[in-house]
Image (tube, grey):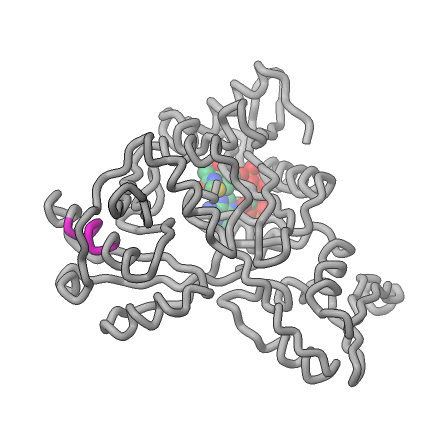
Amino acid sequence: MEQLAQSVRARAVALMEQVLRGGRPLAGEYPLVFDARFPGRVLAIEEQGQVVSACAAIVRDFVVGPHTVRVGLIGSVATHPEHRGRGLATELLGAAERALAQDGCWLALLWADDPVFYDERGWTPVGCEIDFVLESWQQGRLCGTNGIRAAGPDDWAAIHRLYGMHRERVDRSLEETRALLAGPGIETLVLQRSRDVVAYSCLGRGGDFARTVHEWSGADEDVVALTRAHMQRAQARGEEGPTYLLTPPSARTLHERLRGGGIACAEGVLAQGKLLDLHAAAALLGALAGPQGSVSLESQVESQGGAARVLLSGPRGALAIEAGELLDVLIPARGRRTRVDALARATGLSLDGLPLPLFAWGLDSI
Ligand SMILES: CC(C)(COP(=O)(O)OP(=O)(O)OC[C@H]1O[C@@H](n2cnc3c(N)ncnc32)[C@H](O)[C@@H]1OP(=O)(O)O)[C@@H](O)C(=O)NCCC(=O)NCCS
């Protein structure tokens, strides 16, 4: 993605801060986008020297077990109030999608307070997270432990190392983790045993993730103890209501432990997503289908709409997937396996790697 001239960028950021934060700064909350040391970019539309619409975008490599997939994130979409309804945000979103595709992203993700605007522009709910709801009276059901304290800058390298132990994560540098942890409104706790930090957890982030533990790493019982500590601190501050714990679908033993304690949970979607590059997505499907599978792209004739389809073949047969259905195979909303199971039956492929358990932790979102 091309960098904007400094002066345009400064005006674009000022517009985003005005529209999204009532003039308060965004750089602390989203350093990877707004701090020039990091790879995020600002895109803008300018008219007669005035920035009228702006958004942020960043290319991230997501680690998903043995695979690394390149995904673009979009955020902080804002149009000047006097210029709304003219198609500016739609145009800018399209430009951001094209720029991310050019930078090698097969998928774009975003987190919107109001998804309707994006729904109408081809974005759909994708991926899965399991969200636990811990009522304050359930605190006693969670085991505590000694050695939990607020994290300080000396802990950030240990936290980064623990983050890197997740099978599903974003490929973050230590410098990026440091900048993210220094953001406003994050309560980060660590659990230390003798000299070692063995677990951590983050609650809250700027205006997002209120009362929510959105990023953590460590053994199940330690994550539970950290969550309990966040609940105790909230209670001491006089806060009421439940605490939420976000988890990836792969954290199965943690899920069992919490469910066993009677803690309610719900399957949520990870984000809104849009397919950016059909060829790259088809290649990914081919890699996930294993050595017995093969993938080819078919262009349909004009009378059938002209759109491309992906043909997946296996030992039993082949099945075509419309371009618009591919995300529902690769990262379906709430991890639903309906399409994957139908594909496995038709092709005779096991398709064990699908859906792709792609996951973003709380500090990874923009
Ligand atoms: C959402 C926003 C970026 C749209 O900007 P815009 O330049 O007016 O967008 P466009 O002109 O391309 O599209 C406007 C369309 O979106 C619709 N729209 C605007 N805000 C919407 C919302 N919150 N929900 C659903 N639709 C919305 C308008 O009704 C209009 O519909 P139409 O095209 O059918 O007439 C702008 O309203 C804004 O800055 N809002 C405040 C910040 C915000 O909510 N940002 C998104 C957070 S990531």
Q: Please tell me in which quadrant of the rendered image residue 245 appears.
A: bottom left
Whether residue 85 can be seen here: no
Residue located 73% across and 83% down the image: 348
Q: At x 63% / y 75%, what residue is drawn?
A: 339
Residue 19 place in picture, x, y as percent: 43, 31
Which residue range is magenta in the image? 227-232
Up the image or down, 141 lies above or below 272; here it is below
Front-most of residues 302 and 74 = 74
Q: Residue furthest right?
A: 301
Please tell me which residue is depicted at 54% across the width and 28% down the height of the picture: 38
Q: Main secondary structure of the magenta part?
A: helix
Q: Is residue 181 magenta?
A: no
The part of the image, by quadrant, that contains residue 260 is bottom left
Q: Is residue 260 left or right of residue 25?
A: left
Residue 351, given in percent of the width and then of the height, sits at 66, 74
Picture layout, residue 355 above or below residue 347: above
- The N terminus is located in which quarter? top right
Q: Position of residue 56 (x, y in %)?
A: 55, 34
Residue 164 in picture, x, y percent from top left: 48, 47
Along the viewing direction, whichever of 12 and 86 lies nearer the viewer: 12
